[in-house]
Amino acid sequence: MAVSKDIRRVVTTVDENGKAVVLFDGPNPNTVVRPQRGTVSRLMWVTGETPADIAGPVDRGDARVGIAPPPNGSVFRIIDIPPITAETEALPVDYHASQHGASTPKRHMRPRHPLMHATRSLDYALVLEGEIDMLLDDSEVHLKAGEVVIQQGTNHAWVNRGTEVCRIAFVLIDGQEP
């Protein structure tokens, strides 16, 4: 699968004179293609503390993190989810869930789909383009561009049953056990 169009990222800061300036302007430095699913994940920014460190010239988008945010931190990423394939549907039912380790809430049900997982975080998701189904433990919700999901540590899977890529913006904030 070819990487879909990139996203311009503009990051501002306050310089040594107290003036608002552009720190970075261009494609984000952190794009990961997951070939087993065809998903393209663009990490835009990561914080490792609350309140967040908002000073200095560090590119906090040029970081390596898992799916969940760091302890007491946050993650902002944009993900392109292609239509699901028969190969992905055939993966072990705990495929995605098994990749989360300590970030998985202690209380959750067994996955019912290979892409089902849970993170101990508050997640804001905004569908930017396309359509997608969010699978929950025993239900699902169909979402379209412009619609929002707020998840509170829930078991879920993103399944694109359409014919076009679905682009979703996610902000994950570290949370307590649900």
Image: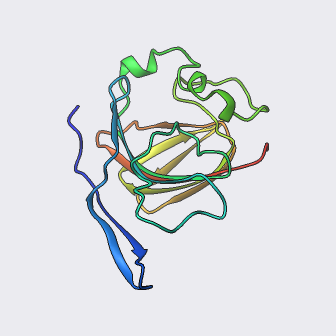
Residue 10 image point, x, y percent: 33, 67
Vertical placement of residue 82 versus 28, above or below: above
Residue 61 place in picture, x, y as percent:
41, 52
Q: Residue 104's image quarter?
A: top right
Rendered view: 41 above or below 13 = above
Does residue 127 appear in the picture of this structure?
yes
Side (left or right) of 102 relative to 47: right
Q: Position of residue 120 (x, y in %)?
A: 69, 42
- Which sits in the foreground, 56 or 99? 56
The residue under the point 38% across, 30% down is 84
Residue 113 in the figure: left or right of residue 26: right
Q: Residue at x 66, y 46 (%)?
A: 71
Q: In this view, which residue lies farthest toward the front?
A: 16
| The N terminus: image quadrant | top left
Q: Nearer the viewer, residue 42 or 108?
A: 42
Instruction: Name which quarter of the figure residue 154 lies in.
Output: top right
Quarter of the figure with the C terminus: top right
What residue sits 69% from the left and 23% below the top?
110
| Residue 137 visible within the image | no
